[in-house]
Image (cartoon, rainbow, N blue to C red):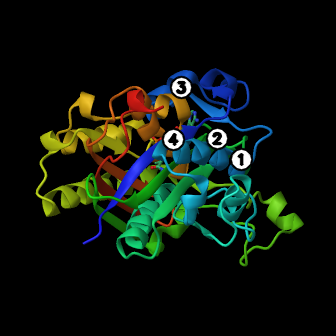
Amino acid sequence: MNKASLISIASYVPSKVLSNYDLEKIVDTSDEWITKRTGIKERHIAQNEITSDLGTKAARVAIRRSGLKESEIDAIICATLSPDHFCMPSTATKIAKNLELNPGIMAFDISAACTGFIYLLELAKSLVQSGIKKNVLIVGAEKVSSIIDYTDRSTCILFGDGAGAGVVSLSDENEIIDTHTASDGRYGELLITPAPGSLYPSSQEVLDKKLNFLKMSGNEVFKIAVQTLTKDVLEIMQKNKIASEEIDLFIPHQANLRIIEAVKQRLDFKDEQCVVTIHKYGNTSSASIPMAMNDAYEDGRLKNGSLILLDAFGGGFTWGSALLKFGGKDFKDLE
Ligand code: UT7
């Protein structure tokens, strides 16, 4: 059977840094509270760039690192909860245009919130293994700051902007071993951007009630995230008969250091197996996993053939996990 492999990874982070001390000047919060409750010290905010710009910059590097030409990419899928436009055109089509990918290429966005990159891996794997596509560009790109209410201290301290991208291609080795994607719409109200949409089209009332901003029942989300992720990660390891100590890197979605620590402890991962970037970037939703992967890649921890485990949880609710061997060249061997 055909095998699909993630053959490159890259990220892009906008330059402006918003620190906890900056936020102290905007809302009633403190560096101490944010650090203790979330592990976040700073996040990056896009100023004169939009989501497709961030995605384009990460994707350009991901294609270069894959060793492929732009013309060999035959599909692009972008996961985002902060698209350039809420209806159309998709952010994926704009990234395709920016990169001058082949006109006629399949391009679309998916809405799976913070679980976006796991959904992307499953979709890309399916497309490649079925023989429908050869080289699928996957992008998690977010300008979350565009849907954040900077007077709401319970959300504005959490999120940041950024993008991560990779290419999934046919390969004999280092395959995407398994992916699991899931959802439960009964919890939709707990993490929601109510407008604009068919329920609440743009109106003065939407603006007055701030329905265009992300709203989260943080504590409830937290508890369900810990339980769900622990179970999900355990299941994918058991299904594939892999023990914690065999995993080279555990790269979780970066939403809260306490969630990462809880899952890590329950599943017996050691500190050196865990990739943590939340202190630098905050929660960048669908971009958080590929951004964390890229940090581990550039500092030499993520290598060709590394066995990695990913997990994510987000609005919807959606959640999922992925087990793969990284198929890219070692960072030091890139030309
Ligand atoms: O990526 C998608 C998935 N997202 C997540 O998984 C996020 C999950 N949730 C969380 O990470 C945490 O719930 C938060 C970090 C959002 C909040 O931490 P918490 O420990 O659950 O705090 P809480 O919401 O229970 O609030 C505790 C207190 C409240 O005050 P009172 O009612 O006890 O007086 C809040 O008003 O902390 C207060 N508070 C703050 N204080 C200072 C909330 N936000 C802040 C703040 N600064 N920024």
How far apart, in angstroms, are the residues tagged by discs 3 and 2? 13 Å
Sooner in the amino-acid sequence: mark 2 or mark 1: 1
The kind of residue on which mark 1 rests is: Asp
Mark with earlier residue (3, 1): 3
In space, the residues marked 3 and 1 are separated at their CA atoms by 25 Å
125 lies above or below 13: below
Residue 110 image position (x, y, % from top left): 56, 67
Residue corresponding to mark 4? 10
Label 1, label 4: how far apart the Cα atoms are? 14 Å
Mark positioned earlier in the residue sequence (3 or 2): 3
Which quadrant of the rendered structure holds the N terminus? bottom left
Residue under numbered circle 1:
53
Cβ atoms under marks 1 and 4 closer than 8 Å: no
Sequence order check, earlier mark of 1 and 4: 4
Q: Residue placed at 69% from the left, 44% from the top?
A: 145
Task: Report the residue at 13% width, 52% height from top.
Answer: 242
Q: Secondary structure at mark 4?
A: strand
Q: Can the viewer see residue 113?
A: yes
Q: CA distance from mark 3 to mark 4?
A: 23 Å
Which residue shows up at 47% across the image and 74% down it? Answer: 185
10 Å crowding of disc 2: few (<14), some (14-19), many (20+): some
> Seen in the image, is 145 located left or right of residue 162?
right
